[in-house]
Structures are given as structure tokens and as C-alpha cells.
């Protein structure tokens, strides 16, 4: 799993419910990110973090919150799920501990369905 | 808006050389990255760089704003989605991905 573990792998929510997608890495790397994958849209960056206590928005941040209290964990929160958030979510880290390299190691994804 | 463009589908016969083209409008991007994604699995990097390069059966061509991924002796097992991406050298924390190319391989 390239040192990136995502849970849960599958989740069904009703509109308006909240949930957190968990992501953990065991490589002590500073950079972590969340992408969503949708047919015809590719991989789009939601939020990313370059270290504990530091987060920033990506291309499609609306409807999602993140925090980075530790280097290991980077949870993605949906406060009020909407059908438009039905997607496959990928967490990723860069290949080097403290530098962006372009080589991302992805988790295996979390498939979320919002009814 | 910074964007990366690639065809939605490419079809090939088994054993052929298949080419997937990519170009971008990211003014500060100098590197291309090609990722392979099988549904249900994690996407993984195939080849990258700011010059032509090769990794096994995967060749990457390079021009300033375009790149092609060439897969030699393509197999049915290569059927997957291939993503092209570029990075912004002024914000290397962000990779900009294309919409993905679904490769179909016919026997």
C-alpha cells in the first residue's frame, strides 16, 4: 500500500450526513494530499498538507475539511454530504520526506456513495 | 486556468505500439508524469521527467508543452486508465492531472 492506508474502503451515506475518511502514513513524510476521482474528470486535488499544522486548498475544496495534527494522519471530513460528493477518494504522499518530487504514492482509495 | 489535456479513449491491437498524447497549458510546468491506474487499485507512477525517458515497455517523449506515453508490445493486461500530469515549478506541492485516457486493447 506504499505506506498509505485509507479507511474505510467503501461507505454509503445519506444526504446531509457527516463522515471522516481516514488516511495514515507510516513513512514520516511531510507532504500528504487528498484527490477525488470522477469519470471524465480525472484526479482532482481537494486539499493538501506540507506538514503538521499546515494545510491548503486544492482545486475542489468546497464541502471538505482537513486537519493535520500529526505527521502520520490526514483525515478528510465531509460535514454535510451531498450526492455530488459521490466519488472515489485517494490519499497520497510524495516519495521523499520533505520535498515535492512529483512521484505520489497513493492509497488504495475509498469509494463513497451519497444517496 | 492551468489544465492538462489528454484523449478520453485510445484503442489498440495486442502487440502494437500504442501512443497516448498529452499537452498542457500550465505555464510554469516543466515536468511530465505518467501514472497508471487499474480500477480498485492505487494509481502508480510509470515514468516522469523533463526529457525523453524509458522504463521497461514505457517510453515517454518530451516537448516543452506536450508529451506522449508509448507502450511497446501492448497486451490485454495493459487495459487501464493512464493519467498525464504536470507540476507547477512555483508550487511543486501540486500536481495537475489530466482527465485520464482509457486504453482498450483488442486481441
Image: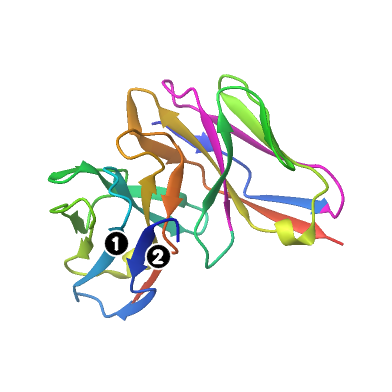
* Secondary structure beneath label 1: strand
Q: Residue placed at 64% from the left, 58% from the top?
A: B80
Task: Tell me if B44 is positioned left or right of A49 in this view.
Answer: right
| Quadrant, the C terminus of chain A | bottom left
Q: Residue placed at 18% from the left, 69% from the top?
A: A80
Residue under label 2: A87
- Circles 1 and 2 in contact, beta carbons < 8 Å: no
Q: How many marks?
A: 2
Give the camera-side residue of A112 and A55.
A55
Q: What range of the chain is rendered magenta?
A: B13-37
| Residue B59 seen in this snapshot | yes
* Image mark 1: chain: A
Give the camera-side residue of A81 and A11.
A11
Residue A48 placement (x, y as % from top left): 27, 45
Q: Quadrant of residue A36?
A: bottom left
| Residue A115 seen in this snapshot | no
**First in sequence: mark 1 or mark 2?**
1
Q: Residue placed at 83% from the left, 60% from the top?
A: B106
**Residue A23: which numbered mark, if any?**
1
Label 2 crowding class (10 Å Cα cut-off): few <14, some 14-19, many 20+? some
Amino acid at each position: 500500500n506504499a505506506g498509505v492506508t485509507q479507511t474505510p474502503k467503501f461507505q454509503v451515506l445519506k444526504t446531509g450526513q457527516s463522515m471522516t475518511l481516514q488516511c495514515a502514513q507510516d513513512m514520516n513524510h511531510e507532504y500528504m494530499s487528498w484527490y477525488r476521482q470522477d469519470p471524465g474528470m480525472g484526479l482532482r486535488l481537494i486539499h493538501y498538507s506540507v506538514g503538521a499544522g499546515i494545510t491548503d486548498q486544492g482545486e475542489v475544496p468546497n464541502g471538505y475539511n482537513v486537519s493535520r495534527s500529526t505527521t502520520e494522519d490526514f483525515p478528510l471530513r465531509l460535514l454535510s454530504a451531498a450526492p455530488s460528493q459521490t466519488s472515489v477518494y485517494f490519499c497520497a504522499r510524495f516519495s521523499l520526506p520533505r520535498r515535492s518530487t512529483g512521484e505520489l504514492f497513493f492509497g488504495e482509495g475509498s469509494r463513497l456513495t451519497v444517496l | 486556468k492551468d489544465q492538462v489535456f489528454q484523449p478520453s479513449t485510445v484503442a489498440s491491437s495486442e502487440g502494437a505500439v500504442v501512443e497516448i498524447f498529452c499537452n498542457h497549458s500550465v505555464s510554469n510546468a516543466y515536468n511530465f508524469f505518467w501514472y497508471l491506474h487499474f480500477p480498485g487499485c492505487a494509481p502508480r507512477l510509470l515514468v516522469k521527467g523533463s526529457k525523453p525517458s524509458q522504463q521497461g515497455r514505457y517510453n515517454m517523449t518530451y516537448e516543452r508543452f506536450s508529451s506522449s506515453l508509448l507502450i511497446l508490445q501492448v497486451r490485454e493486461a495493459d487495459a487501464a486508465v493512464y493519467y498525464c500530469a504536470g507540476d507547477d515549478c512555483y508550487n511543486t506541492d501540486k500536481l495537475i492531472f489530466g482527465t485520464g485516457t482509457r486504453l482498450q486493447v483488442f486481441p
